[in-house]
Image (cartoon, rainbow, N blue to C red):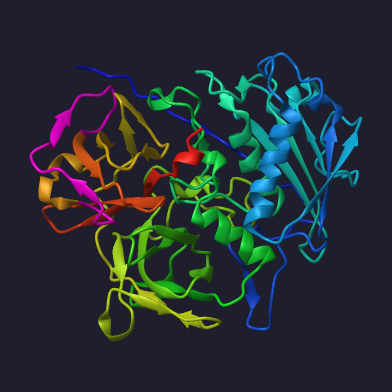
Amino acid sequence: MIRRSLSLIIITSVFLAARPQPSQAYTLQYRDSSGILARRWLTNPILISFSSSLAAPPANIKVGSDVIETARHALRHWSAASNVRFIELTSQVQAISPPNSGDGINVITVSTESGPLFGSSDNPALTRVFYDSSGAIVEADIALNPHELFSTDGTPGTYDLESTLTHEIGHLIGLDHSAVIAATMQPRQAKNGMYGLPAFTQRTLSNDDKIAARSLYGPRNGTGSISGKLITSSGGRAETIFGAHVFAEEVATGRVVAGSVTLANGDYHLEDLPPGEYRLIAQSLNGPVAARDISPGGGSYLGLVDTTPSFRSFVGLGPNLAEATTVKPNVAVDSSFFVLSTPPPSLKPAVIGMNDELSTAPLPLEPGKTFTIYVGGPGVDGIKADDISLSSSLLTVNLGTLRDEEFDVPYPVISFEITVARNIQPGDYSIRLRSSSNELAYLPGAITVESPSNRK
């Protein structure tokens, strides 16, 4: 049976500054050992002007949608997660500022005047951010694409307005895209109807999103951090790895907590980690989130197209060669890794899915139920049932359910059943694959388990 494959729209935010500065690497960016480069607002609260277009939205927004209240909800998600604060104003401004001429008004607009910004693009929204000479944000504007359909009630074929605005406000406060699949700040958004469900997942901030916001604005009392470099060898010389994804899973629960993408100098930073034991995993960005998706605006990631050099996924070994790194309150852990020169990855899961659809959207699973899920990409057809595992013991792969599937895509697809325990904690979990040659590949945050109150 041939089933259709549904690709998702990249949410591209344009970062154009009055004076170009390096772009934020999702969590904190260090200039050097003497200080931190500001990639955030230094004024707090932030004044947000709701364009008059929100009160009288155009026809691409479903009739009856309360755009103003939805925008307020999106702002509250970030202020509830961190010390960033917003003050709501109103404005008659309909269009965002041109690239090199900010007007000092931080506007959210849904006006049809934004149409020329998008041209033929089907991206749902755009955020334009302005910086001063020190790298601090001084203005940020958000525009919705008037050529795309939005709703607040899950109408199939529309974008969920709250999810879109929550993602864009993440850019407004200084965040780039995340490589954690279930993060609100991952670079793609599903339309309602994907997997036969409303696309509400990105309304809820992941742990990765919350930690990113707190890294910029606090609070950070009693937390620790892990940072370091990824280095390999080329021609007998040390070489840093640009565009690798380093993410942390809680050892106790298996939840994905935070992720970082390495800079050109190989640096990664995982900030604001609660005390505990973490498993660090590093891999090339060649899956559902690609390296080129992290920051299309450039900045610190200017020129990033692929992880360079590419390497095979590995679990970072901590002290005493343990697979866990201990984080203590107010302690910064230095955990750098030398990546052995290996062949490039051959096991590259690119999509996931359920309910007869493939996508790059996270799989929303409910406690106490069993689901058939799909994984597709080069090399997955060589996977055996006992080579599939999940980051939590409360997520069980049912042996004997592994199947080859037929989809209209240029790579193999497999399916298998997962049973979700009733007592699993809400959060995001990873799918782990191992090939017959012992090669590892991860789908970080591919599974998201939400509390019942967040499923509406």
* Residue 350 shown in magenta: no
Most prominent secondary structure in the magenta stretch?
Answer: loop
Residue 139 visible in image: yes
Q: Quadrant of residue 233?
A: bottom left
Instruction: Residue at 36% x, 59% y: name it.
Output: 283
Residue found 45% across the figure and 22% down from its top? 193
- Residue 223 lies, in percent from the top left, at 54, 75
Which residue is more in the foreground, 64 or 314? 64
Q: Quadrant of residue 312?
A: bottom left
- Given residues 103 and 280, the one toward you in this image is 280
Place of residue 245 in the rendered image (x, y in percent of width and height, measured from the top left): 43, 59
Q: Is residue 396 magenta?
A: yes
Coordinates of residue 410 in the picture (x, y in percent): 27, 29
Position of residue 113 in the picture relative to residue 63 (left or right): right
Q: Nearer the viewer, residue 432 or 219?
A: 219
The image shows residue 396, relative to residue 338, as above or below, that is above
Please tell me in which quadrant of the rendered image residue 35 appears: bottom right
Residue 13 in sight from this viewpoint = no
Magenta highlight range: 389-413
Residue 449 position in % (x across, y down): 39, 45
Task: Say left or right for 267 vs 385.
Answer: right
Taking the spot 47% from the left edge, 30% from the top edge, the residue there is 8
Position of the N terminus, as image quadrant, is: top left
Residue at (35% x, 64% y) in the render: 281
